Image (spheres, grey):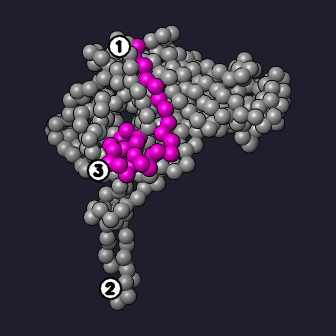
Amino acid sequence: MARYVSVQNQLIGLFESGTYANASGNFWTGLVQSHNITPSEGTFAVKYMGGVGRDVNVHVQGAKLWEGELVQYPQHFRFLAWALGSNVDAGSPSPYTHLITAIGNDVQTAFTSGAVNPFLSFGIEEVNPTPGDGTNQGYRVKGCIVNEWELAGAQGEILTETVRYFGTSGTSISGTIATINNFNYGTSAIGSITDRPYIFGDVSLEIPGGTVWSPMTDFSLKVRNNLVNRHYLTGSRDATAPAPTLREIMLDLGMDGHSENMGSIYRTFYEGGSDFNAALRVNASTGSRENYIFLSGCRVLDPLEMPFGLEGINPWTIHLQAKGITGSIADLLQRYNPY
């Protein structure tokens, strides 16, 4: 018996075009640190009056659902574009630019019109090579849509990107591992592997009076689509395309507290009760990998955590919610989606 070793796993992304959940071409997912897929067969344990004994009489499989979580060190913002739903690629040669915007109230029209889907669906294929006998086992999930996207960082660390998604259908696979044929880094496949991931030192926060908020120690930016899964009358156990509900955009900031922070944050941004705009700048090297994530209509929410203690530096936590989000991205990734 050969045990699976995680570092040998191969995770491949699948582009989808034409029809929702139709894979066409693949791409390298990135510097993946972990991937967890949770399939559900929706199995019911059925009992009935007059059945045999006190135990379950029969099991019935119901609606299928695939849910996954991918964590990686980010080198680009492709998954942010797919979470928000709209992206325009430009630029040649590198750096390539990507204008990311959020789909609004037209999202339901996009679902019902037969488009690929408004969130640029993708597929995931994970293969577990079996040492010794050359047998490879894994699965392929199609029709994946980002439910929640998160970019997080802490001082001295590499940034982490977490992508939580729902898939509409999946199947087990075996045999030869596919060759990744679309690194999407112009003509250089190796470039996608060697470009360093973004680190905490690449990040700065720009807001009105931004210097007052400078002593940040950690941050977490989240976009939640709050997808709802449905199983319509399609003659299949597979789920249909998930439907988005209320979108949430949250930015949590950890910082070292000091007197200037307290006065400005409390009086101007919290007690003052006014919206403001902010920008998260992620800059790996000026010009070639300079990225801005713009947050509009921000407001400081409860609770405003500003504790004081006898020892150490006071750790404060600020929670922001934004009304809108866009991205102006410059990186070495030629196109976020070829279709």
User: Circle 1 sits on which residue?
Assistant: 92
Question: Residue at horizontal 48%, vertical 10%?
Answer: 287
Answer with mark 3 or mark 1, whichever residue precedes in sequence.
1
Magenta-colored span = 95-121
Hey, what amino acid is under mark 2?
Val
The crowd level at tag 1 (other Cα within 10 Å; few <14, some 14-19, many 20+) is: few
User: Circle 3 sits on which residue?
Assistant: 170
Hey, what amino acid is under mark 3?
Gly
Q: Nearer the viewer, mark 3 or mark 1?
A: 1
Q: Position of residue 258 (x, y in %)?
A: 80, 23
Q: Quadrant of residue 275?
A: top right
Identify the element where label 2 is drawn: loop
Q: Quadrant of the C terminus?
A: top left
Q: Quadrant of residue 282?
A: top right
Q: Position of residue 257 (x, y in %)?
A: 77, 26
Q: Is residue 103 magenta?
A: yes
Question: Residue at horizontal 59%, vertical 24%?
Answer: 280
Q: Quadrant of the N terminus?
A: top left
Q: Is residue 28 magenta?
A: no
Question: Residue at horizontal 30%, vertical 52%?
Answer: 169
Identify the element where label 3 is drawn: strand
Q: Quadrant of residue 44?
A: bottom left
User: Circle 2 sits on which residue?
Assistant: 52
Instruction: Give the answer, above or below, for where 165 lies relative to 152.
Output: below
